[in-house]
Image (tube, rainbow, N blue to C red):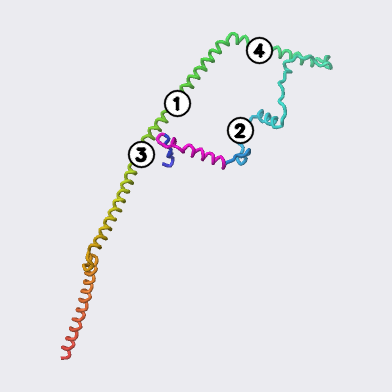
Protein backbone atom coordinates (compact mmCIF):
# COMPACT_ATOMS: atom_id res chain seq x y z
CA UNK A 1 0.00 0.00 0.00
CA UNK A 2 2.92 2.37 0.61
CA UNK A 3 4.06 2.13 -3.03
CA UNK A 4 0.54 2.38 -4.45
CA UNK A 5 -0.06 5.37 -6.69
CA UNK A 6 -3.47 6.94 -6.25
CA UNK A 7 -4.60 8.82 -9.36
CA UNK A 8 -7.21 11.42 -8.48
CA UNK A 9 -7.63 12.75 -12.03
CA UNK A 10 -10.15 11.00 -14.26
CA UNK A 11 -10.01 12.76 -17.64
CA UNK A 12 -12.24 10.17 -19.29
CA UNK A 13 -15.21 10.85 -16.99
CA UNK A 14 -14.61 14.35 -15.66
CA UNK A 15 -16.94 16.93 -17.11
CA UNK A 16 -17.24 20.66 -17.03
CA UNK A 17 -14.11 21.57 -18.97
CA UNK A 18 -16.18 22.89 -21.87
CA UNK A 19 -18.58 24.84 -19.69
CA UNK A 20 -18.82 28.57 -20.06
CA UNK A 21 -16.19 30.43 -18.10
CA UNK A 22 -13.93 27.45 -17.35
CA UNK A 23 -11.41 28.22 -20.10
CA UNK A 24 -11.42 31.91 -19.22
CA UNK A 25 -10.81 31.08 -15.56
CA UNK A 26 -7.86 28.83 -16.43
CA UNK A 27 -6.33 31.49 -18.69
CA UNK A 28 -6.77 34.09 -15.95
CA UNK A 29 -4.91 31.84 -13.50
CA UNK A 30 -2.07 31.42 -16.02
CA UNK A 31 -1.85 35.17 -16.56
CA UNK A 32 -1.81 35.78 -12.82
CA UNK A 33 1.04 33.28 -12.43
CA UNK A 34 2.95 34.98 -15.25
CA UNK A 35 2.54 38.38 -13.58
CA UNK A 36 3.82 37.07 -10.25
CA UNK A 37 6.74 35.14 -11.79
CA UNK A 38 9.00 37.39 -13.82
CA UNK A 39 12.07 35.43 -14.96
CA UNK A 40 15.28 37.38 -15.42
CA UNK A 41 18.26 36.68 -17.64
CA UNK A 42 20.15 34.92 -14.86
CA UNK A 43 17.25 33.22 -13.12
CA UNK A 44 19.28 29.98 -12.95
CA UNK A 45 22.19 31.46 -11.02
CA UNK A 46 21.11 29.78 -7.80
CA UNK A 47 21.36 26.35 -9.47
CA UNK A 48 24.68 24.51 -9.87
CA UNK A 49 26.18 24.01 -13.31
CA UNK A 50 25.61 20.63 -14.95
CA UNK A 51 28.42 18.13 -14.52
CA UNK A 52 29.85 17.81 -18.04
CA UNK A 53 33.37 16.76 -17.04
CA UNK A 54 32.81 13.01 -17.58
CA UNK A 55 31.88 13.70 -21.21
CA UNK A 56 34.70 16.09 -22.09
CA UNK A 57 37.71 14.77 -24.00
CA UNK A 58 41.11 16.51 -24.16
CA UNK A 59 40.30 17.70 -27.68
CA UNK A 60 37.00 19.19 -26.51
CA UNK A 61 38.71 20.88 -23.55
CA UNK A 62 41.28 22.47 -25.86
CA UNK A 63 38.58 23.61 -28.24
CA UNK A 64 36.53 25.12 -25.39
CA UNK A 65 39.61 27.01 -24.21
CA UNK A 66 40.26 28.26 -27.75
CA UNK A 67 36.67 29.44 -28.12
CA UNK A 68 36.69 31.15 -24.71
CA UNK A 69 39.97 32.91 -25.65
CA UNK A 70 38.46 33.96 -29.02
CA UNK A 71 41.30 32.38 -30.98
CA UNK A 72 40.79 31.35 -34.63
CA UNK A 73 40.71 27.71 -35.61
CA UNK A 74 43.84 26.30 -37.15
CA UNK A 75 43.50 25.68 -40.87
CA UNK A 76 43.97 22.25 -42.35
CA UNK A 77 47.62 21.62 -43.06
CA UNK A 78 48.31 20.65 -46.67
CA UNK A 79 52.05 20.39 -46.20
CA UNK A 80 52.18 16.63 -46.41
CA UNK A 81 50.59 16.74 -49.88
CA UNK A 82 53.39 18.95 -51.16
CA UNK A 83 56.73 17.78 -52.67
CA UNK A 84 59.14 20.60 -51.84
CA UNK A 85 62.86 20.26 -52.73
CA UNK A 86 65.51 20.78 -50.08
CA UNK A 87 66.08 24.37 -49.04
CA UNK A 88 68.62 26.34 -51.00
CA UNK A 89 71.06 26.22 -48.11
CA UNK A 90 70.88 22.42 -47.91
CA UNK A 91 71.16 21.44 -51.56
CA UNK A 92 74.52 19.83 -50.92
CA UNK A 93 73.35 17.82 -47.91
CA UNK A 94 72.43 14.16 -48.44
CA UNK A 95 70.07 14.08 -45.42
CA UNK A 96 67.98 16.90 -46.89
CA UNK A 97 67.61 15.09 -50.18
CA UNK A 98 66.83 11.83 -48.33
CA UNK A 99 64.03 13.56 -46.43
CA UNK A 100 62.57 14.86 -49.67
CA UNK A 101 62.79 11.39 -51.24
CA UNK A 102 61.04 9.83 -48.21
CA UNK A 103 58.27 12.39 -48.47
CA UNK A 104 57.86 11.65 -52.18
CA UNK A 105 57.67 7.90 -51.53
CA UNK A 106 55.06 8.44 -48.79
CA UNK A 107 52.99 10.57 -51.18
CA UNK A 108 53.31 7.93 -53.89
CA UNK A 109 52.21 5.18 -51.50
CA UNK A 110 49.26 7.25 -50.38
CA UNK A 111 48.13 7.86 -53.93
CA UNK A 112 48.55 4.16 -54.75
CA UNK A 113 46.34 3.22 -51.76
CA UNK A 114 43.71 5.69 -52.92
CA UNK A 115 43.72 4.24 -56.43
CA UNK A 116 43.50 0.73 -54.97
CA UNK A 117 40.48 1.73 -52.89
CA UNK A 118 38.85 3.17 -55.98
CA UNK A 119 39.42 -0.05 -57.91
CA UNK A 120 38.02 -2.11 -55.03
CA UNK A 121 34.99 0.15 -54.86
CA UNK A 122 34.41 -0.25 -58.58
CA UNK A 123 34.62 -4.02 -58.29
CA UNK A 124 32.81 -4.64 -55.01
CA UNK A 125 31.19 -1.33 -54.11
CA UNK A 126 27.84 -2.20 -55.65
CA UNK A 127 27.52 -5.51 -53.85
CA UNK A 128 28.77 -3.99 -50.58
CA UNK A 129 26.21 -1.22 -50.87
CA UNK A 130 23.45 -3.74 -51.58
CA UNK A 131 24.51 -5.75 -48.54
CA UNK A 132 24.49 -2.58 -46.44
CA UNK A 133 21.02 -1.71 -47.70
CA UNK A 134 19.78 -5.20 -46.82
CA UNK A 135 21.15 -4.88 -43.29
CA UNK A 136 19.73 -1.39 -43.00
CA UNK A 137 16.33 -2.57 -44.28
CA UNK A 138 16.31 -5.41 -41.73
CA UNK A 139 17.19 -2.94 -38.98
CA UNK A 140 14.42 -0.64 -40.15
CA UNK A 141 11.89 -3.50 -40.19
CA UNK A 142 12.93 -4.54 -36.69
CA UNK A 143 12.63 -0.97 -35.43
CA UNK A 144 9.23 -0.70 -37.10
CA UNK A 145 8.04 -3.85 -35.33
CA UNK A 146 9.28 -2.49 -32.02
CA UNK A 147 7.47 0.78 -32.71
CA UNK A 148 4.22 -1.03 -33.53
CA UNK A 149 4.54 -3.14 -30.38
CA UNK A 150 5.18 -0.02 -28.31
CA UNK A 151 2.16 1.71 -29.83
CA UNK A 152 0.04 -1.37 -29.11
CA UNK A 153 1.25 -1.43 -25.50
CA UNK A 154 0.41 2.26 -25.14
CA UNK A 155 -3.02 1.66 -26.65
CA UNK A 156 -3.63 -1.26 -24.28
CA UNK A 157 -2.60 0.84 -21.29
CA UNK A 158 -4.87 3.68 -22.41
CA UNK A 159 -7.74 1.24 -22.97
CA UNK A 160 -7.29 -0.34 -19.55
CA UNK A 161 -7.06 3.10 -17.98
CA UNK A 162 -10.19 4.23 -19.77
CA UNK A 163 -12.06 1.07 -18.78
CA UNK A 164 -11.00 1.40 -15.14
CA UNK A 165 -11.99 5.06 -15.11
CA UNK A 166 -15.31 4.30 -16.77
CA UNK A 167 -16.12 1.70 -14.11
CA UNK A 168 -14.99 4.11 -11.41
CA UNK A 169 -17.09 6.84 -13.01
CA UNK A 170 -20.21 4.70 -12.96
CA UNK A 171 -19.54 3.91 -9.30
CA UNK A 172 -19.01 7.58 -8.50
CA UNK A 173 -22.17 8.60 -10.31
CA UNK A 174 -24.14 5.90 -8.48
CA UNK A 175 -22.77 7.00 -5.12
CA UNK A 176 -23.43 10.64 -5.97
CA UNK A 177 -27.04 9.87 -6.94
CA UNK A 178 -27.50 7.88 -3.72
CA UNK A 179 -26.04 10.75 -1.70
CA UNK A 180 -28.36 13.25 -3.41
CA UNK A 181 -31.33 10.98 -2.66
CA UNK A 182 -30.38 10.69 1.02
CA UNK A 183 -29.85 14.44 1.33
CA UNK A 184 -33.20 15.08 -0.34
CA UNK A 185 -34.93 12.63 1.99
CA UNK A 186 -33.31 14.23 5.03
CA UNK A 187 -34.42 17.62 3.80
CA UNK A 188 -37.98 16.37 3.30
CA UNK A 189 -37.97 14.77 6.76
CA UNK A 190 -36.75 18.01 8.33
CA UNK A 191 -39.51 19.92 6.54
CA UNK A 192 -42.14 17.41 7.67
CA UNK A 193 -40.86 17.57 11.26
CA UNK A 194 -41.01 21.36 11.16
CA UNK A 195 -44.57 21.23 9.82
CA UNK A 196 -45.59 18.73 12.50
CA UNK A 197 -44.09 20.91 15.21
CA UNK A 198 -46.08 23.84 13.88
CA UNK A 199 -49.27 21.74 13.89
CA UNK A 200 -48.63 20.52 17.46
CA UNK A 201 -47.92 24.04 18.66
CA UNK A 202 -51.08 25.33 16.97
CA UNK A 203 -53.13 22.52 18.56
CA UNK A 204 -51.77 23.36 22.01
CA UNK A 205 -52.60 27.01 21.56
CA UNK A 206 -56.09 26.08 20.35
CA UNK A 207 -56.68 23.83 23.40
CA UNK A 208 -55.60 26.62 25.73
CA UNK A 209 -57.97 29.01 24.02
CA UNK A 210 -60.96 26.59 24.08
CA UNK A 211 -60.55 25.37 27.70
CA UNK A 212 -62.63 27.41 30.34
CA UNK A 213 -60.59 29.35 32.91
CA UNK A 214 -62.13 27.44 35.95
CA UNK A 215 -61.33 24.03 34.55
CA UNK A 216 -57.71 23.15 35.20
CA UNK A 217 -55.57 21.99 32.33
CA UNK A 218 -53.85 18.66 32.20
CA UNK A 219 -50.59 20.18 33.32
CA UNK A 220 -52.29 21.91 36.24
CA UNK A 221 -54.01 18.65 37.30
CA UNK A 222 -50.70 16.78 37.25
CA UNK A 223 -49.06 19.55 39.24
CA UNK A 224 -51.94 19.52 41.79
CA UNK A 225 -51.74 15.73 42.17
CA UNK A 226 -48.06 16.04 42.79
CA UNK A 227 -48.62 18.54 45.58
CA UNK A 228 -51.30 16.33 47.22
CA UNK A 229 -49.02 13.29 47.22
CA UNK A 230 -46.31 15.34 48.85
CA UNK A 231 -48.75 16.58 51.54
CA UNK A 232 -49.92 13.05 52.30
CA UNK A 233 -46.39 11.85 52.76
CA UNK A 234 -45.63 14.71 55.12
CA UNK A 235 -48.82 14.01 57.17
CA UNK A 236 -47.96 10.35 57.44
CA UNK A 237 -44.59 11.20 58.81
CA UNK A 238 -46.17 13.52 61.42
CA UNK A 239 -48.66 10.85 62.59
CA UNK A 240 -45.94 8.31 63.01
CA UNK A 241 -44.00 10.65 65.27
CA UNK A 242 -47.10 11.32 67.47
CA UNK A 243 -47.77 7.62 68.03
CA UNK A 244 -44.21 7.02 69.09
CA UNK A 245 -44.46 9.87 71.65
CA UNK A 246 -47.71 8.44 73.16
CA UNK A 247 -46.14 4.98 73.43
CA UNK A 248 -43.21 6.41 75.31
CA UNK A 249 -45.53 8.24 77.75
CA UNK A 250 -47.56 5.07 78.45
CA UNK A 251 -44.36 3.13 79.09
CA UNK A 252 -43.15 5.71 81.60
CA UNK A 253 -46.49 5.66 83.53
CA UNK A 254 -46.42 1.87 83.83
CA UNK A 255 -42.93 2.00 85.24
CA UNK A 256 -43.95 4.55 87.89
CA UNK A 257 -46.85 2.35 89.06
> Which residue is identified by label 3?
173
Residue 54 or 173: which is nearer the viewer?
173
Residue name at image x 59 percent, y 8 percent: 123
**Is tag 3's residue or tag 4's residue first in the polypeptide sequence?**
4
Q: Within 10 angstroms of label 2, few (less than 14), some, or many (20 or more) residues?
A: few
**Is tag 2's residue or tag 1's residue first in the polypeptide sequence?**
2
Q: Within 10 angstroms of label 4, few (less than 14), some, or many (20 or more) residues?
A: few
> Which residue is identified by label 2?
54
Front tag of 2 and 3: 3
Residue name at image x 72 percent, y 18 percent: 78
Residue name at image x 24 percent, y 65 percent: 219
Spot occupied by residue 107 in the image (x, y as percentages of width and height): 71, 13
> Is 250 placed above or below 190 here?
below
Q: CA distance from mark 2 to mark 1?
A: 35 Å
Q: Within 10 angstroms of label 1, few (less than 14), some, or many (20 or more) residues?
A: few
Q: Main secondary structure of the magenta part?
A: helix
Q: Secondary structure at mark 1?
A: helix
Front tag of 2 and 1: 1
Q: Is residue 30 magenta?
A: yes
Tag 2–tag 1 contact (CB < 8 Å): no
Q: CA distance from mark 3 to mark 1?
A: 32 Å
> Which residue is identified by label 1?
151
Instruction: Tell me the tag on residue 46.
Output: none
**Is tag 2's residue or tag 3's residue first in the polypeptide sequence?**
2
Q: Within 10 angstroms of label 3, few (less than 14), some, or many (20 or more) residues?
A: few
> Is 77 placed above or below 71 here?
above
**Is tag 2's residue or tag 4's residue first in the polypeptide sequence?**
2
Question: Magenta residues?
Answer: 12-36
Q: CA distance from mark 2 to mark 4?
A: 38 Å
> Which residue is identified by label 4?
114
Amino acid sequence: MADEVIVDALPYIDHGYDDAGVRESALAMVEEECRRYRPTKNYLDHLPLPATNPFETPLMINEFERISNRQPMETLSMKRYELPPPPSGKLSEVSAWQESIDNSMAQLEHQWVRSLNLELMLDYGTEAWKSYLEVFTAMQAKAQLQLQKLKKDIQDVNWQRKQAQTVAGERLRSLEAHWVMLVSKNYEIENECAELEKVVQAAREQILQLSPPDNPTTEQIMEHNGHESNDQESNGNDNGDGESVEDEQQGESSNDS
